[in-house]
Every structure is written in C-alpha cells, then in structure tokens.
Image (spheres, rainbow, N blue to C red):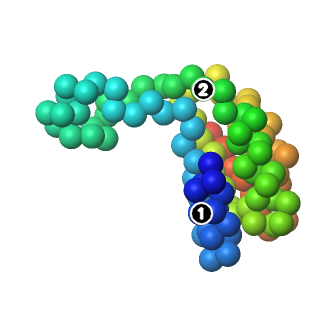
C-alpha cells in the first residue's frame, strides 16, 4: 500500500487520474498461462476484505489534499454498494471519485 500511496501523491501533483481495479484474481490457470502467456483471460472474481484498507488509503491521501481523480471498480457485483458508499466519503469540488458502474 505504501507504493500505491506514493504513486497516487505523484498523480495528484501532475493532475493525472488513477483507476483501481478491485477483487480480480489474475492468471488462475497455470498450465494455460505457461502455454499462452499471462493476462489472456484466465481471471476470476475474487472475494477479499478490502474496505478498511481502501478507506485508509483514500483518507491518508485526502488529509493533505493529495488524492488524485480516482475511478474505483470491481468485477464482483456484490461489492458495488461498498464502493458506492466509499466514494461518497471523498467527494470535493476538484476531485470526483467514480465507480465504473456510473460511467
């Protein structure tokens, strides 16, 4: 999370946006990934408890106005309420967090 924190601070400084893709389990089939390469669609929906860590990240960046424009999205539909409520906590005039289902 420290790396993500430092990257996000830089994105804000240079007026860049970020998108965070949550709960993707990547490259699940080792045999096919070895045969065809990684990132070829052998991904699945994950099931992680991430809300506390995401809140901490967004809050720490927001304390010093270092939170860049942010898109949060998840392929696990049951998590849309978590993301929708989370982005509502960090709105401002200059920063708009979005959930991909709203775009």
Quick check: 98 above or below 8? above
Q: Earlier in the sequence, mark 2 or mark 1?
A: 1
Q: Secondary structure at mark 2?
A: loop
Is residue 15 visible to us here? no
Q: Position of residue 14 (x, y in %)?
A: 62, 77
Quarter assignment of residue 60: bottom right
Q: CA distance from mark 2 to mark 1?
A: 23 Å
Q: Residue furthest front?
A: 2
Crowding near the residue tagged with mark 2, few <14, some 14–19, many ≥20 C-alpha atoms within 10 Å: few
Tell me whether circle 2 and circle 1 mark residues in contact (CB < 8 Å). no
Q: Residue at x 33, y 32 (%)?
A: 27
Q: Position of residue 17 (x, y in %)?
A: 61, 63
Disc number for residue 48: 2
Q: Residue at x 77, y 42 (%)?
A: 55
Q: Position of residue 30 (x, y in %)?
A: 25, 27
The residue lying toward the viewer, choosing from 85 and 55, is 55
Quick check: 73 above or below 75? below
Q: Position of residue 85 (x, y in %)?
A: 80, 37
Left or right of 97 on screen, residue 36: left
Q: Residue at x 20, y 28 (%)?
A: 32
Disc number for residue 97: none
Q: Residue at x 31, y 41 (%)?
A: 39
Disc number for residue 7: 1
Left or right of 38 on screen, residue 101: right
Is residue 18 visible to us here? yes
Q: How many marks overall?
A: 2
Q: Residue furthest left?
A: 35
Crowding near the residue tagged with mark 1, few <14, some 14–19, many ≥20 C-alpha atoms within 10 Å: some
């Amino acid at each position: 999370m420290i790396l993500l924190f430092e990257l996000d601070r830089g994105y804000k400084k240079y007026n860049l946006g970020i998108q965070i893709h949550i709960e993707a389990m990547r490259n699940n089939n080792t045999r096919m990934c070895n045969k065809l390469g990684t990132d070829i669609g052998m991904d699945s929906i994950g099931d992680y408890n991430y809300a506390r860590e995401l809140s901490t990240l967004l809050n720490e960046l927001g304390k010093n106005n270092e939170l860049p424009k942010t898109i949060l999205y998840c392929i696990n539909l049951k998590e849309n309420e978590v993301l929708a409520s989370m982005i509502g906590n960090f709105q401002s005039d200059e920063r708009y967090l979005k959930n991909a289902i709203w775009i």
